[in-house]
């Protein structure tokens, strides 16, 4: 009992800030003498270890940078070391059993000396005994912890010796104070683990007693904490950045997620991984890297439209801090709209989509931006061939509030003007984007995040048509911790996307066409961890859409264009969801979720009704129905099931299955297979039904060679109904009755994705092969004309074979190269086969829809990263990236088209990046 | 300045990026000869039926469409009644004595000289209701022509129209003299008239109408065509013969799809063209594409005239104009000027003497309307 009091007193002292870096002084100190001149630290240590009982524990990096110059005469070791490390940023600690620990910044063992003091006589100090002594009050333990050796006691002792207690906390970067997403937090025996969520938050149910808690995160040092669980408690953990891995793929945090995690069909990319994949313009491009993942394809080179597992480009929910992005590209799709310097991570869900998400059929791409450095001001930037970017961040209130502002712009306009070709000089192309994020910690339990995003594009090709588009997004999040086991996040978002196309060159048809979509949403999510076996997510959301489908105004008095405006559309989409993850045993876990969504198309609007049983066409309009403001035009609703299960075979392999259903109420109208700036979005209404998609997936995961090599194979089968396909000759712009030009098609997609990934080591990267098919069928004569005799046909983005290799080789810590290879089958095309005379005129005979394919695609890219030295104390860290895109100069077709010239019809193949394209980029970070 | 910017490596690089490259692309499938059978025409239940058999041509091929000659063409009824066609011109097959009964079903049988056999599905002979009225209206500087029809029995529902327009036009200059056999002489009444001509044109656009959304089977004011104010076609007088056919729903959809298939093709940015499904198949190879859609119907037609006198008085109509040159006899170049025939004399030029001292002349196209039309007045011309 007396020990108990003494230790608590000590702890209290610690809490008040005493003797934080004080070393055990009550032991008898050995006095040392000697002279050291320009002695390397290694040698210094060697000598000390020979001559004294001390044992040294330190990182090799210390040896690199510390040189010892001193004369000692009967001085205690701590004085000598204090002299050695003065001004180096290193700290040391000496234990009573003559162990010396050298660490960066802070000495280890802030409290161990205290416990040790009490225990010093008990030489048989088992760890468990140590654990049972001394404790820190609960509020104390929620302090940010940095020591790996200190024993953290969680909760108040006194309860039973068996059972579980909950441990929750936030993982933060020690340097910037930013939350760490997706870090793996686990204990090894028994294996219990979790991943930190997007706020860096984790909650674990652990057996009472002593544990070693391991933390692994991408690009950060692997670390661990010694803990003793007494009852529920908090432990916030700060992790140091691993500077050497600045450009290296260190996916250690992910190492066994593949096998041990329940989630399947999900890829998480860290910005560090993304940064080393070479791109056409030397600019780090998130979407381009996402496109290298298995199951993700795009129809064309300069296109950021993704086709995930056979879904069309509008079936991806792209979220930037929870706000929907409608057009994720710049400059016709050559750049993605995300500034790499502000991005923290990207998560792509291809199957087993969590119940929290909904509204799109194929995938969820969640892009999170960084919070900003909470400790000091810093910045980063890059200078590339076509773009430059700069990001500044820092604390407003230290450790409480941080701000991050990032911007990016292009000087392509200026470059175009330099080209002595008239059509280029008359062209314009410019864009910029701006990100801001403010995060504020109100108190222990409340955090607020405010983010804003703005991107604008403007381009004009050959002085003819001017295209402009913009994204504006804002989100406000409030995270509230009720207690360890329950927290909530309330989010309000607003997204705006609009574009306009003006034609001014020709006064006769000078006009401006505008389109816009606005989306305001609120969402509340709860995460509840009732016990070690269950994780409960539930919540609800509501989105209000306002669409201006088209507005045509003439912009010249002599213009012959008639002003025209399509009726605005409004709708509300709401959903409630609940899902439970149930870990039945260590090997077997299931997750079951249900989302129920309701969609109401609202007036005021006049809508057409069509004769039943025949395809909708202008000739079959039977009536016009008028709806007043706010009146319901159509209601759709339905359940969406999300089920998944995992069974583990030992530690190294597992099998997972999942089923999910999704419903989509907004549709993109595009007369091209890619994403184009002229795409418009359409809400479901009485004539256009929502799309529904089901997917089953089965995966096998195996880790080899101590988790250094990951193998995964996933197979899926997908059914889609009522997605929009186009009837022949569809007109999608300024169409007052778009339902007459589209048809609800049915689709199916299936495939196998195999991936082999080596995440660590000098050579790292991945190889993935995908076999997949995507088929469409239009076989209902009451809906549209029948395509290809009502048979299944390849959809526009059906590319059966796809092989991707991303490889990096690190020659030294400052020089690395990467070589990437992509191959895929050419996309399908409908060819004009012949011409014929029909008695009055020549007409063209086409092949079946998508019967043929354009030539196969392949490309090799090469990049080199050269970094400055890795000294920590440096004004700025900089690096050069030299890359060659399309090393072999293969002329991959971007577009195949046919033109009628002098009565002959000739085919042409256009390739955009038809030569090797070298780029140089300079990046800096301060 | 220009040369300096050429030397800028960045500019070079950008040029390289943006120029891309466009190469001719002709996949093998297009190189192979695509000669699919084309069947034009319909089974006419109110007159002689003409069926034209052609072959498709490769896209880069010029020249006349190849005809499928010496084929055996016949029509068979469901009750095995058979009518044979005879080839009247290369690839043109006619049947004069065929009696088709509305409501009954018939099919077309083709056996090519190579022995390949084709057959259409059985198609019902649709009875086409009469055209009620063809009207026209001058609106917004153009003449709009409308067709009206109805079917009291509400059976027809789907319609297709073709029209043939014939218009009278005049040469820009009226010539009083001619150059013949090396001499200029006055035009005589029995010389071939070259001032007033007629020209005809068939419709190339597909004109379709449907009354499916209406409670009664009425087509009211379907806009068939428009003629701009300044068109030569209404400068003097225009006549339009409208032919009306009743269609089955399948035929209507076939024509509608054909209509939507636009001229721009295959690029990433174009709407999807789609293949048409014919109701004629090869009996030997079911996968062989055949072009054409057989329909059977009675035909209804009506003709109207649009006289320029009836057009709004304030309209400035098309007026041909040409300028003339003069050649003096004294220059000795008269023969040289007119012998080639590319210019025609228009009138005589007089000086002091009663004999002409020269001739005015103009390019042949300004004087001779038969270059572009026929000087034979159509029998129906009012």
Image (cartoon, rainbow, N blue to C red):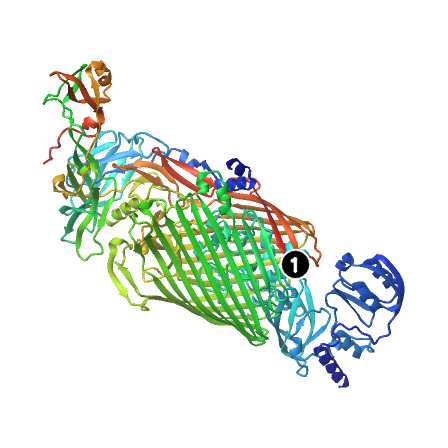
A318 displayed left or right of A403? left
Q: Secondary structure at mark 1?
A: loop
Q: Which image quadrant for residue B216?
A: bottom left
Of residues A308 and A659, the one nearer the viewer is: A308
Q: Which image quadrant for residue B9?
A: top right
Q: Return the residue at label 1.
A: A707
Residue projecting furthest to the front: B352
B375 displayed left or right of A807? left
Report whether residue A577 is seen: no
A20 displayed left or right of B277? right
Whole-percent x, y for residue A179 in the image: 60, 66
Report whether residue A449 is seen: yes
Whole-percent x, y for residue A685 in the image: 34, 62
Of residues A805 and B336, the one nearer the viewer is: B336
Is A105 rendered above or below residue B248? below
Whole-percent x, y for residue A121 in the image: 83, 78
Is B263 rendered above or below residue A180? above
Q: Quadrant of the C terminus of chain B?
A: top left
User: How dense is the environment of label 1, judged by Cα within 10 Å: few (below 14), some, or many (20 and up)?
Assistant: many
Whole-percent x, y for residue B299 in the image: 16, 42
Of residues A244 and A653, the one nearer the viewer is: A244
For mark 1, name the chain. A
Report the residue at 50% width, 68% height from top.
Answer: A476
B81 displayed left or right of B258? left
């Amino acid at each position: 009992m007396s020990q108990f009091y003494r230790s608590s007193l000590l702890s209290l002292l610690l809490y008040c800030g005493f003797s934080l870096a004080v070393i055990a002084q009550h032991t008898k100190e050995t006095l040392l003498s000697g002279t050291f001149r320009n002695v390397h630290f290694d040698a210094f240590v060697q000598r000390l270890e020979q001559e004294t009982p001390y044992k040294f524990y330190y990182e090799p990096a210390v040896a690199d940078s510390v040189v010892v110059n001193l004369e000692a005469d009967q001085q205690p070791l701590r004085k000598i070391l204090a002299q050695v490390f003065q001004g180096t940023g290193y700290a040391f600690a000496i234990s009573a059993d003559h162990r010396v620990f050298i660490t960066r910044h802070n000495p280890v063992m802030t409290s161990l000396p205290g416990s040790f003091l009490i225990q010093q006589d008990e030489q048989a100090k088992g760890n468990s005994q140590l654990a049972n002594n001394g404790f820190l009050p609960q509020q104390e333990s929620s302090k940010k912890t940095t020591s790996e050796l200190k024993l953290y006691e969680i909760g108040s002792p006194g309860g039973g010796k068996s059972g579980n207690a909950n441990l929750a906390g936030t993982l933060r970067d020690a340097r910037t104070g930013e939350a760490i997403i997706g870090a793996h937090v686990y204990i090894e025996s028994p294996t219990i683990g979790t991943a930190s969520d997007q706020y860096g938050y984790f909650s674990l149910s652990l057996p009472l007693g002593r544990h070693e808690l391991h933390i692994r995160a991408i690009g950060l040092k692997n670390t661990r904490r010694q803990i003793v669980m007494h009852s529920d408690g908090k432990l916030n953990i700060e992790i140091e950045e691993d500077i050497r891995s600045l450009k290296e793929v260190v996916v250690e945090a992910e190492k066994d997620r593949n096998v041990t995690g329940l989630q399947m069909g999900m890829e998480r990319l860290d910005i560090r991984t993304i940064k080393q994949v070479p791109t056409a313009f030397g600019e780090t491009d998130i979407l381009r890297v996402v496109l290298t993942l298995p199951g993700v394809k795009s129809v064309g080179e300069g296109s950021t439209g993704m086709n995930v597992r056979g879904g069309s480009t509008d079936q991806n929910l792209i979220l930037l801090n929870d706000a929907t992005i409608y057009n994720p590209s710049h400059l016709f799709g050559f750049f993605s709209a995300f500034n790499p310097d502000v991005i923290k991570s990207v998560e792509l869900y291809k199957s087993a989509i969590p119940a929290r998400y909904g509204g799109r059929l194929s995938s969820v791409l969640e892009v999170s931006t960084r919070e900003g450095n909470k400790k000091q001001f810093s910045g980063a930037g890059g200078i590339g061939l076509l773009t430059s970017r700069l990001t500044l961040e820092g604390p407003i209130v230290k450790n409480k509030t941080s701000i991050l502002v990032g911007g990016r712009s292009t000087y392509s306009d200026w470059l175009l003007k330099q080209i002595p070709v008239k059509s280029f000089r008359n062209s314009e192309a410019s864009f910029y984007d701006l990100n801001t994020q403010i995060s504020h910690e109100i108190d222990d339990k409340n955090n607020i995040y405010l983010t804003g995003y703005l991107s604008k594009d403007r381009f004009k090709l050959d002085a003819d048509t001017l295209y402009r588009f913009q994204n504006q997004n804002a989100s406000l999040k409030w995270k509230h911790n009720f207690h360890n086991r329950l927290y909530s996040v309330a989010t309000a978002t607003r997204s705006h996307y609009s574009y306009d196309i003006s034609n001014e060159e020709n006064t006769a048809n000078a006009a401006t066409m505008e389109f816009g979509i606005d989306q305001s949403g609120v969402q509340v999510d709860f995460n509840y961890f009732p016990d070690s076996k269950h994780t409960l997510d539930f919540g609800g959301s509501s989105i209000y859409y306002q669409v201006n489908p088209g507005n045509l105004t003439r912009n010249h008095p002599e213009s012959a264009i008639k002003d025209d405006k399509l009726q605005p559309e409004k709708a509300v989409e709401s959903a409630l969801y609940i899902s439970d993850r149930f870990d039945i045993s260590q090997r077997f876990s299931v997750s079951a979720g249900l989302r129920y969504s309701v969609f109401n198309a609202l007036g005021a609007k006049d809508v057409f009704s069509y004769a039943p049983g025949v395809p909708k066409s202008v000739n079959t309009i039977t009536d016009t129905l008028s709806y007043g403001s706010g009146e319901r035009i159509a209601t759709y609703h339905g359940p969406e099931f999300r089920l998944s299960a995992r069974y583990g075979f030992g530690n190294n392999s597992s099998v997972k299955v999942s089923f999910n259903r999704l419903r989509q109420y907004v549709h993109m109208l595009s007369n091209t297979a890619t994403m184009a700036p002229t795409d418009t979005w359409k809400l479901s209404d009485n004539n256009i039904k929502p799309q529904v998609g089901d997917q089953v997936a089965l995966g096998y995961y195996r880790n080899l060679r101590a988790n250094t090599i990951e193998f995964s194979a996933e197979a899926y089968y997908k059914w889609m109904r009522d997605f929009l396909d186009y009837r022949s000759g569809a007109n999608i712009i300024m169409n007052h009755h778009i339902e007459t030009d589209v048809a609800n098609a049915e689709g199916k997609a299936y495939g196998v994705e195999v991936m082999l990934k080596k995440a660590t080591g000098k050579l790292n990267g991945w190889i993935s092969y995908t076999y997949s098919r995507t088929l469409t069928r239009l076989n209902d004569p009451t809906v549209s004309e029948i395509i290809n005799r009502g048979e299944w046909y390849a959809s526009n983005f059906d590319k059966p074979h796809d092989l991707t290799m991303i490889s990096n080789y690190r020659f030294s810590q400052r020089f690395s190269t990467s070589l990437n290879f992509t191959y895929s089958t050419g996309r399908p095309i409908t060819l004009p086969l012949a011409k014929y005379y029909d008695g009055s005129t020549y007409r063209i005979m086409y092949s079946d829809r998508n019967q043929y394919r354009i030539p196969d695609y392949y490309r090799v890219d090469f990049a080199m990263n050269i970094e400055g030295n890795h000294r920590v104390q440096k004004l700025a860290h900089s690096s050069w990236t030299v890359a060659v895109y399309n090393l072999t100069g293969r002329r991959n077709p971007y577009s195949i088209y046919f033109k009628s010239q002098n009565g002959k019809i000739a085919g042409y193949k256009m390739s955009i990046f038809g030569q090797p394209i070298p780029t140089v980029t300079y990046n800096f970070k301060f | 300045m220009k040369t300096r910017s050429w030397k800028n490596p960045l500019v070079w690089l950008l040029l390289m990026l943006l120029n891309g490259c466009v190469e001719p692309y002709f996949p093998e499938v297009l190189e192979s000869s695509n000669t699919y059978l084309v069947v034009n025409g319909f089974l006419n239940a109110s007159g002689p039926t003409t069926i034209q058999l052609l072959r498709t041509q490769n896209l880069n091929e010029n020249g006349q469409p190849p005809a499928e000659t010496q084929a055996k063409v016949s029509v068979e009824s469901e009750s095995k009644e058979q009518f044979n066609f005879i080839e009247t011109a290369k690839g043109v097959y006619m049947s004069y004595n065929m009696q088709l009964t509305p409501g009954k079903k018939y099919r077309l049988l083709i056996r090519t000289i190579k022995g390949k056999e084709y057959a259409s599905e059985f198609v019902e002979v649709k009875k086409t209701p009469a055209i009620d009225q063809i009207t026209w209206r001058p609106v917004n500087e153009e003449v709009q022509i409308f067709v009206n029809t109805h079917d009291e029995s509400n059976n027809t529902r789907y319609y297709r129209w073709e029209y043939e327009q014939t218009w009278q036009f005049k040469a820009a200059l009226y010539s009083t003299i001619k150059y013949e056999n090396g001499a200029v002489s006055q035009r005589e009444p029995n010389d071939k008239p070259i001032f007033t001509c007629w020209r005809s044109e068939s419709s190339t656009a597909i004109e379709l109408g449907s009354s499916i959304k209406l409670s009664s089977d009425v087509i009211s004011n379907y806009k068939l065509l428009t003629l701009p104010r300044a068109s030569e076609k209404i400068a003097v007088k225009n006549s339009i013969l409208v032919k009306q056919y009743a269609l089955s729903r399948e035929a209507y959809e076939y024509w509608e799809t054909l209509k939507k298939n636009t001229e721009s093709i295959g690029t990433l940015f174009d709407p999807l063209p789609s293949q048409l499904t014919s109701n004629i198949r090869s009996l030997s190879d079911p996968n062989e594409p055949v072009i054409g859609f057989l329909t059977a119907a009675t035909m209804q037609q009506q003709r109207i005239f649009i006289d320029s006198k009836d057009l709004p008085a304030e309209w400035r109509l098309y007026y041909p104009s040409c300028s003339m040159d003069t050649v003096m006899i004294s220059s000795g170049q008269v023969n040289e000027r007119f012998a080639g025939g590319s210019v025609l004399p228009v009138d005589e030029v007089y000086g002091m003497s009663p004999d002409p001292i020269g001739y005015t002349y103009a390019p042949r196209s300004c004087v001779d309307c038969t270059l572009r039309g026929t000087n034979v007045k159509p029998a129906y011309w009012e």
